[in-house]
Image (tube, helix red, strand yellow):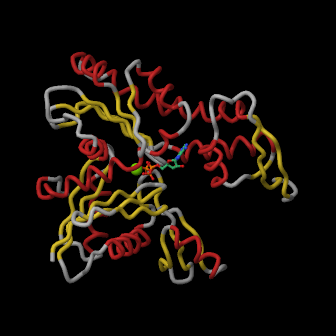
Amino acid sequence: MSKYFAVDLGTSLTKISDKSRKRYLIEPTIAAVDTDSAKLVAFGTDALSVIDAKPGRVKIFKPIRYGQIEDLNLGRQIISHLLKKAGHNKLGRSYVLVSTYGDSTKVQQRAMVRSLKEAGVHEVRFLESTIAASIDLNLPIGEPVGNMVIILGAGRCEAAVLSLGSVVTSASLGMGATDIDNSIKSHFIRNYNINVSTLFCGRLREVIVRDNQRFTVHNIVGYDISTGETVSVDVTAEELWGVIDEVLSQIIQGITQVLTSTPPDITNDLCQSGVYLLGGLTRLDGLKEMVAEAMELPVHTSSNPEMHVIGGLRKSLSHFSDMTKV
Ligand SMILES: Nc1ncnc2c1ncn2[C@@H]1O[C@H](COP(=O)(O)OP(=O)(O)OP(=O)(O)O)[C@@H](O)[C@H]1O
Ligand SMILES: [Mg+2]
Protein backbone atom coordinates (compact mmCIF):
# COMPACT_ATOMS: atom_id res chain seq x y z
CA MET A 1 0.00 0.00 0.00
CA SER A 2 1.26 3.56 -0.80
CA LYS A 3 1.84 5.93 2.08
CA TYR A 4 2.60 9.64 2.06
CA PHE A 5 4.61 11.33 4.81
CA ALA A 6 5.49 14.97 5.56
CA VAL A 7 8.78 15.52 7.41
CA ASP A 8 9.99 18.74 9.08
CA LEU A 9 13.34 18.08 10.76
CA GLY A 10 13.84 21.03 13.12
CA THR A 11 16.92 21.94 15.12
CA SER A 12 14.84 21.65 18.29
CA LEU A 13 11.67 19.76 17.32
CA THR A 14 11.09 17.10 14.67
CA LYS A 15 7.59 16.94 13.24
CA ILE A 16 6.21 14.16 11.04
CA SER A 17 2.75 13.55 9.68
CA ASP A 18 1.09 11.14 7.31
CA LYS A 19 -1.64 11.89 4.82
CA SER A 20 -4.26 9.45 5.90
CA ARG A 21 -4.37 9.50 9.67
CA LYS A 22 -4.10 13.26 10.31
CA ARG A 23 -1.80 12.65 13.24
CA TYR A 24 1.44 14.38 14.07
CA LEU A 25 4.50 12.79 15.58
CA ILE A 26 6.42 15.50 17.46
CA GLU A 27 9.71 14.72 19.19
CA PRO A 28 12.55 16.82 20.58
CA THR A 29 15.45 16.46 18.12
CA ILE A 30 17.69 14.55 20.54
CA ALA A 31 19.45 11.25 19.85
CA ALA A 32 20.88 8.72 22.33
CA VAL A 33 23.83 6.99 20.65
CA ASP A 34 25.95 4.01 21.72
CA THR A 35 29.40 5.54 21.30
CA ASP A 36 31.13 2.14 20.87
CA SER A 37 29.01 0.98 17.93
CA ALA A 38 27.83 4.44 16.67
CA LYS A 39 24.29 2.99 16.71
CA LEU A 40 21.19 5.03 17.50
CA VAL A 41 19.71 3.69 20.73
CA ALA A 42 16.72 6.01 21.08
CA PHE A 43 15.35 9.26 19.73
CA GLY A 44 13.27 12.10 21.17
CA THR A 45 11.78 11.85 24.66
CA ASP A 46 12.85 8.16 24.78
CA ALA A 47 16.48 9.26 24.41
CA LEU A 48 16.40 11.02 27.78
CA SER A 49 15.18 7.94 29.65
CA VAL A 50 17.76 5.65 27.97
CA ILE A 51 20.60 7.79 29.28
CA ASP A 52 19.40 7.07 32.83
CA ALA A 53 19.22 3.34 32.16
CA LYS A 54 22.55 2.95 30.33
CA PRO A 55 24.93 5.65 31.53
CA GLY A 56 28.52 5.63 30.25
CA ARG A 57 28.51 4.22 26.74
CA VAL A 58 25.36 6.01 25.68
CA LYS A 59 25.67 9.72 24.95
CA ILE A 60 23.10 12.35 24.04
CA PHE A 61 23.49 14.27 20.77
CA LYS A 62 21.60 17.10 19.13
CA PRO A 63 21.98 15.82 15.58
CA ILE A 64 20.73 18.93 13.76
CA ARG A 65 22.68 22.16 13.78
CA TYR A 66 21.31 25.28 12.13
CA GLY A 67 18.72 23.18 10.36
CA GLN A 68 21.16 20.66 8.88
CA ILE A 69 21.97 17.05 9.81
CA GLU A 70 25.58 17.11 11.02
CA ASP A 71 26.44 13.39 11.00
CA LEU A 72 25.07 11.58 7.93
CA ASN A 73 25.43 8.11 9.42
CA LEU A 74 23.40 9.13 12.48
CA GLY A 75 20.98 11.09 10.26
CA ARG A 76 20.22 7.93 8.22
CA GLN A 77 19.45 5.95 11.38
CA ILE A 78 17.22 8.72 12.75
CA ILE A 79 15.24 9.02 9.51
CA SER A 80 14.78 5.26 9.34
CA HIS A 81 13.65 5.12 12.98
CA LEU A 82 11.21 8.03 12.64
CA LEU A 83 9.58 6.79 9.45
CA LYS A 84 9.08 3.34 10.97
CA LYS A 85 7.47 4.98 14.01
CA ALA A 86 5.22 7.05 11.74
CA GLY A 87 4.01 3.89 9.96
CA HIS A 88 6.42 3.42 7.03
CA ASN A 89 6.77 -0.21 6.01
CA LYS A 90 9.54 -1.29 3.63
CA LEU A 91 7.13 -3.64 1.86
CA GLY A 92 4.81 -0.78 0.85
CA ARG A 93 5.63 2.28 -1.27
CA SER A 94 6.39 5.41 0.74
CA TYR A 95 6.48 8.96 -0.61
CA VAL A 96 8.09 11.64 1.56
CA LEU A 97 7.79 15.44 1.33
CA VAL A 98 10.55 17.26 3.24
CA SER A 99 10.78 20.95 4.22
CA THR A 100 13.82 22.92 3.00
CA TYR A 101 15.38 26.25 3.85
CA GLY A 102 15.76 29.07 1.34
CA ASP A 103 19.52 28.58 1.08
CA SER A 104 19.75 24.77 1.31
CA THR A 105 22.00 23.38 -1.42
CA LYS A 106 21.38 20.60 -3.95
CA VAL A 107 24.20 18.63 -2.27
CA GLN A 108 22.37 18.77 1.09
CA GLN A 109 19.10 17.80 -0.56
CA ARG A 110 20.72 14.88 -2.39
CA ALA A 111 22.18 13.64 0.91
CA MET A 112 18.65 13.72 2.36
CA VAL A 113 17.27 11.82 -0.65
CA ARG A 114 19.96 9.15 -0.23
CA SER A 115 19.19 8.73 3.48
CA LEU A 116 15.47 8.40 2.77
CA LYS A 117 15.99 5.95 -0.10
CA GLU A 118 18.25 3.82 2.10
CA ALA A 119 15.36 3.72 4.57
CA GLY A 120 13.24 2.19 1.77
CA VAL A 121 11.42 5.34 0.64
CA HIS A 122 10.25 5.25 -2.99
CA GLU A 123 10.13 8.97 -3.90
CA VAL A 124 11.25 12.19 -2.17
CA ARG A 125 10.14 15.76 -2.86
CA PHE A 126 10.99 19.13 -1.26
CA LEU A 127 9.00 22.24 -0.36
CA GLU A 128 10.37 25.49 1.08
CA SER A 129 9.29 26.02 4.66
CA THR A 130 7.96 29.56 4.01
CA ILE A 131 5.76 28.26 1.17
CA ALA A 132 4.56 25.34 3.29
CA ALA A 133 3.61 27.69 6.16
CA SER A 134 1.72 30.04 3.85
CA ILE A 135 -0.21 27.07 2.41
CA ASP A 136 -1.18 26.04 5.94
CA LEU A 137 -2.39 29.60 6.64
CA ASN A 138 -4.37 29.64 3.35
CA LEU A 139 -2.60 32.86 2.27
CA PRO A 140 -3.44 33.93 -1.31
CA ILE A 141 0.11 33.23 -2.59
CA GLY A 142 -1.15 32.32 -6.08
CA GLU A 143 -2.79 35.76 -6.53
CA PRO A 144 -1.13 38.95 -7.86
CA VAL A 145 -0.76 40.32 -4.32
CA GLY A 146 2.15 40.35 -1.87
CA ASN A 147 2.25 38.04 1.15
CA MET A 148 5.01 37.85 3.71
CA VAL A 149 5.95 34.99 6.04
CA ILE A 150 8.73 35.00 8.63
CA ILE A 151 9.72 31.81 10.48
CA LEU A 152 11.97 32.15 13.53
CA GLY A 153 13.06 28.73 14.80
CA ALA A 154 15.73 27.18 16.98
CA GLY A 155 18.49 27.20 14.35
CA ARG A 156 17.13 29.00 11.30
CA CYS A 157 15.31 32.22 10.51
CA GLU A 158 13.54 32.40 7.18
CA ALA A 159 11.66 35.28 5.58
CA ALA A 160 9.95 35.32 2.19
CA VAL A 161 7.71 37.62 0.20
CA LEU A 162 5.44 35.49 -1.99
CA SER A 163 3.26 36.42 -4.93
CA LEU A 164 1.84 34.73 -8.06
CA GLY A 165 2.85 31.31 -6.76
CA SER A 166 6.54 32.03 -6.28
CA VAL A 167 9.09 33.63 -3.97
CA VAL A 168 9.69 37.30 -4.89
CA THR A 169 12.42 38.03 -2.31
CA SER A 170 13.73 36.01 0.61
CA ALA A 171 16.31 35.75 3.37
CA SER A 172 17.63 32.60 5.00
CA LEU A 173 19.75 33.01 8.13
CA GLY A 174 21.65 30.25 9.93
CA MET A 175 20.66 31.85 13.25
CA GLY A 176 17.92 31.23 15.78
CA ALA A 177 17.02 30.57 19.41
CA THR A 178 20.19 28.47 19.84
CA ASP A 179 22.33 31.58 19.26
CA ILE A 180 20.50 33.42 22.04
CA ASP A 181 21.25 30.49 24.40
CA ASN A 182 24.93 30.49 23.39
CA SER A 183 25.12 34.24 24.01
CA ILE A 184 23.56 33.89 27.47
CA LYS A 185 26.04 31.11 28.26
CA SER A 186 28.99 33.29 27.14
CA HIS A 187 27.65 36.19 29.21
CA PHE A 188 27.82 34.08 32.38
CA ILE A 189 31.34 32.87 31.57
CA ARG A 190 32.59 36.41 30.83
CA ASN A 191 30.92 38.28 33.66
CA TYR A 192 30.57 35.74 36.47
CA ASN A 193 33.20 33.09 35.65
CA ILE A 194 30.52 30.39 35.82
CA ASN A 195 29.59 27.64 33.42
CA VAL A 196 25.82 27.23 32.93
CA SER A 197 24.35 24.53 30.64
CA THR A 198 22.90 25.71 27.33
CA LEU A 199 19.78 23.72 28.23
CA PHE A 200 19.33 25.94 31.29
CA CYS A 201 19.95 29.06 29.16
CA GLY A 202 17.20 27.87 26.77
CA ARG A 203 14.75 27.39 29.67
CA LEU A 204 15.59 30.88 30.92
CA ARG A 205 14.87 32.32 27.45
CA GLU A 206 11.49 30.60 27.40
CA VAL A 207 10.30 32.00 30.74
CA ILE A 208 11.76 35.49 30.68
CA VAL A 209 9.15 38.28 30.55
CA ARG A 210 9.93 41.62 29.00
CA ASP A 211 7.42 43.80 30.87
CA ASN A 212 9.07 43.24 34.22
CA GLN A 213 12.58 43.41 32.87
CA ARG A 214 13.80 45.94 35.42
CA PHE A 215 12.56 44.16 38.52
CA THR A 216 12.52 40.38 38.08
CA VAL A 217 15.54 38.58 39.46
CA HIS A 218 16.58 35.16 38.16
CA ASN A 219 18.67 32.80 40.24
CA ILE A 220 21.33 31.13 38.07
CA VAL A 221 23.09 27.96 39.16
CA GLY A 222 26.32 26.88 37.48
CA TYR A 223 29.89 25.67 38.04
CA ASP A 224 32.69 28.05 38.96
CA ILE A 225 35.17 27.78 36.07
CA SER A 226 38.23 28.08 38.33
CA THR A 227 37.22 25.81 41.22
CA GLY A 228 34.53 23.56 39.67
CA GLU A 229 32.29 24.22 42.67
CA THR A 230 28.55 24.75 42.33
CA VAL A 231 27.72 28.43 42.66
CA SER A 232 24.65 30.57 42.20
CA VAL A 233 24.23 34.21 41.24
CA ASP A 234 21.22 36.51 40.97
CA VAL A 235 20.82 38.46 37.73
CA THR A 236 18.08 40.86 36.72
CA ALA A 237 15.88 40.24 33.71
CA GLU A 238 17.04 43.63 32.44
CA GLU A 239 20.63 42.37 32.24
CA LEU A 240 19.56 39.20 30.39
CA TRP A 241 17.43 41.21 27.97
CA GLY A 242 20.56 43.18 27.06
CA VAL A 243 22.11 39.90 25.85
CA ILE A 244 18.93 38.65 24.13
CA ASP A 245 18.36 41.99 22.39
CA GLU A 246 21.79 41.92 20.80
CA VAL A 247 21.09 38.60 19.03
CA LEU A 248 17.49 39.53 18.19
CA SER A 249 18.63 42.79 16.60
CA GLN A 250 20.92 40.86 14.24
CA ILE A 251 18.10 38.45 13.34
CA ILE A 252 15.58 41.24 12.79
CA GLN A 253 18.08 43.23 10.73
CA GLY A 254 18.69 40.14 8.56
CA ILE A 255 15.01 39.51 7.89
CA THR A 256 14.05 43.15 7.28
CA GLN A 257 16.68 43.26 4.49
CA VAL A 258 14.10 41.40 2.42
CA LEU A 259 11.96 44.54 2.20
CA THR A 260 14.75 46.63 0.64
CA SER A 261 14.68 44.46 -2.50
CA THR A 262 10.89 44.02 -2.64
CA PRO A 263 9.11 46.00 -5.44
CA PRO A 264 7.15 49.00 -4.02
CA ASP A 265 3.72 47.78 -5.23
CA ILE A 266 4.20 44.55 -3.29
CA THR A 267 5.41 46.45 -0.20
CA ASN A 268 2.18 48.49 -0.46
CA ASP A 269 0.18 45.23 -0.37
CA LEU A 270 2.07 44.22 2.78
CA CYS A 271 0.96 47.45 4.51
CA GLN A 272 -2.58 46.01 4.21
CA SER A 273 -2.03 42.27 4.58
CA GLY A 274 0.80 42.46 7.13
CA VAL A 275 3.51 39.96 8.00
CA TYR A 276 2.92 36.47 9.44
CA LEU A 277 5.41 35.80 12.23
CA LEU A 278 5.79 32.04 12.88
CA GLY A 279 8.17 29.48 14.44
CA GLY A 280 8.72 28.66 18.12
CA LEU A 281 10.99 31.63 18.86
CA THR A 282 8.06 33.98 18.20
CA ARG A 283 6.69 32.88 21.58
CA LEU A 284 9.42 35.06 23.09
CA ASP A 285 7.77 37.83 25.06
CA GLY A 286 7.77 41.18 23.22
CA LEU A 287 9.18 39.83 19.93
CA LYS A 288 6.06 40.68 17.92
CA GLU A 289 6.31 44.33 18.96
CA MET A 290 10.04 44.46 18.09
CA VAL A 291 9.40 43.09 14.58
CA ALA A 292 6.42 45.41 14.03
CA GLU A 293 8.52 48.42 15.00
CA ALA A 294 11.48 47.43 12.80
CA MET A 295 9.37 46.61 9.74
CA GLU A 296 6.71 49.29 10.17
CA LEU A 297 4.11 46.74 9.06
CA PRO A 298 1.20 45.02 10.85
CA VAL A 299 2.36 41.70 12.36
CA HIS A 300 0.18 38.60 12.85
CA THR A 301 1.19 35.80 15.19
CA SER A 302 -0.20 32.32 15.80
CA SER A 303 -1.18 30.28 18.85
CA ASN A 304 0.74 27.25 17.51
CA PRO A 305 3.65 28.91 15.68
CA GLU A 306 5.81 25.72 15.41
CA MET A 307 3.19 23.74 13.51
CA HIS A 308 2.56 25.69 10.28
CA VAL A 309 5.41 24.23 8.24
CA ILE A 310 4.41 20.62 8.94
CA GLY A 311 0.73 21.59 8.51
CA GLY A 312 1.46 22.99 5.03
CA LEU A 313 3.59 19.99 4.05
CA ARG A 314 0.78 17.69 5.10
CA LYS A 315 -1.78 19.62 3.06
CA SER A 316 0.59 19.52 0.06
CA LEU A 317 0.88 15.71 0.11
CA SER A 318 -2.21 15.65 -2.13
CA HIS A 319 -0.09 17.31 -4.87
CA PHE A 320 3.05 15.27 -4.18
CA SER A 321 4.09 14.78 -7.80
CA ASP A 322 3.96 18.57 -8.49
CA MET A 323 6.58 19.26 -5.82
CA THR A 324 10.30 19.89 -6.46
CA LYS A 325 12.41 16.81 -7.18
CA VAL A 326 16.20 16.85 -6.78
N1 LIG B 1 8.13 30.91 25.23
C1 LIG B 1 9.18 30.78 24.43
N2 LIG B 1 10.08 31.78 24.36
C2 LIG B 1 11.13 31.67 23.54
N3 LIG B 1 11.40 30.61 22.76
C3 LIG B 1 10.53 29.58 22.80
C4 LIG B 1 9.38 29.60 23.63
N4 LIG B 1 8.69 28.43 23.43
C5 LIG B 1 9.41 27.69 22.55
N5 LIG B 1 10.51 28.38 22.16
C6 LIG B 1 11.58 27.92 21.27
O1 LIG B 1 11.10 27.55 20.00
C7 LIG B 1 12.05 26.65 19.39
C8 LIG B 1 11.28 25.55 18.68
O2 LIG B 1 10.61 26.15 17.60
P1 LIG B 1 10.49 25.42 16.18
O3 LIG B 1 9.86 24.10 16.37
O4 LIG B 1 9.85 26.39 15.26
O5 LIG B 1 12.04 25.26 15.81
P2 LIG B 1 12.70 24.09 14.95
O6 LIG B 1 11.81 23.77 13.80
O7 LIG B 1 13.08 22.96 15.83
O8 LIG B 1 14.05 24.80 14.46
P3 LIG B 1 14.56 25.20 12.98
O9 LIG B 1 13.40 25.23 12.04
O10 LIG B 1 15.14 26.57 13.18
O11 LIG B 1 15.59 24.19 12.62
C9 LIG B 1 12.92 26.12 20.55
O12 LIG B 1 14.22 26.70 20.47
C10 LIG B 1 12.18 26.61 21.78
O13 LIG B 1 13.07 26.88 22.87
MG1 LIG C 1 11.53 24.58 11.94
In the image: residue 149, left or right of residue 164:
right
Count how many numbered circles sit on residues in the image.
0
Of the 4 image quadrants, the one containing the C terminus is bottom left
In the foreground, 187 or 278? 278
The quadrant the N terminus occupies is bottom left
Picture residue at 48% right of the left edge, 63% below the top: 63
Report whether 205 appears left or right of 161.
right
Which corner quadrant of the image does residue 274 belong to?
top left
Residue drawn at 30 percent across, 42 percent down: 130
> Is the residue 116 above or below the residue 98 in the image?
below
Where is residue 248? Give x, y as percent.
54, 33
Q: Answer left or right for 288 relative to 321.
A: right
Q: Position of residue 310 (x, y in %)?
A: 32, 53
Where residue 278 sits, quadrant-wise, is: top left
Q: Residue at x 65, y 32 (%)?
A: 241
Pinpoint residue 56: horizontal percent, then vertical percent: 66, 79
Viewer-nearest residue: 270 or 122: 270
Above/below status of 326 relative to 39: above
Residue 74, percent from left and from top? 44, 71
Is residue 59 positioned above or below 10 on the image?
below
